[in-house]
Amino acid sequence: MALSPWYSRRIMRFDANRCLTAAFQACRLAGTIHREHFRQDDLAVERKADTSPVTRADRESEAAIREVLRRATPELGVLGEEYGQEGDARDRWIVDPLDGTKNFVAGIPYCATLIGLEIDGALVLGICHAALLGPGPPARGSDPARQGETWWAVRGQGAFHGMGTEHATMRRRRPLRVREEGDLSRAFLSHGGLAHFQAAGLWPALGELAARAGRTRGFGDWWGHMLVAEGRCDAMIDPVVAYHDVAAVRVIVEEAGGVFRTRGAVPLGADFRDAAVSVSAALAGSLQDILGF
């Protein structure tokens, strides 16, 4: 993927290998914490001010991620879902320690750690690690470096998938590429929670898409976006997301050749909370005609 001069100037300001290694290490530790708490009877669930759930797994994994990133990249700040902004707000990590907390609480393994890197306002790196997925059960006590599935991308270097978070994962990587299906009647669309579509004023648009698309399924949160990047799904429509939900996602989808858009072309940032889509370039126009973005 050719980089614009705007991205190129920012890419020069960070060491991609060092940052990617740190992000892999942070994901590995977060994954260990997720496996320790997953499907445990004593998992307590609290409610935030916005009524969304939060658990010890969310908070402990973010604290662990912050510690790894702080030691490996002390010059960078961190903006996390649970503990907010720390350090530099210009060059910083964007962290969602456990995307899909409701799934986690319900004992459903479709949840992941998302870590993005923002340099001078540009997202230049993204990693998504689903510690509870992969061949075999999410066993506690097994080698954490070999557990789970990982998707990652660095601007200008493509997007990839691999098993685990060990260094060999980067060598055994599989390139990601979106599927270029331009016919909506043959397209496979994924979407977020239905109630959020109604609250966002997108219910009529979703109904039209469902009637015209070849297939629709509700693979929500990070999972739908990764399916787009893998070429297994043609679009993911998220009626409401925050910055930490999609910072890493955007880099991965775009480096896989996809398009990432927000409603009204609102820039991503710490205060962002609105609708967004990941879609192949071939289908982007059809979605825009119906969704308006």
Image (tube, grey):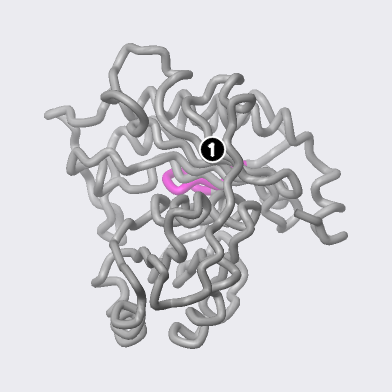
The answer to if 83 sits in the magenta stretch is yes
Q: Please say whether residue 270 is visible from this viewpoint.
A: yes
Q: Please determine whether, in this image, residue 266 is positioned above or below residue 160.
A: below
The answer to if 85 sits in the magenta stretch is no
Q: 182 or 93: which is nearer to us? A: 182
Residue 189: x percent and y percent?
38, 67
Q: 244 or 262: which is nearer to us? A: 262
What residue is shown with label 1? 161
Residue 156: x percent and y percent?
76, 49
Residue at image position (26%, 50%) is: 53
Residue at image position (29%, 63%) is: 217
Number of numbered discs on residues: 1
Q: Pick the quarter of the image with the N terminus.
A: bottom right
Q: Which residues are magenta?
A: 78-84
Residue 84: x percent and y percent?
50, 48
Q: 178 or 49: which is nearer to us? A: 178
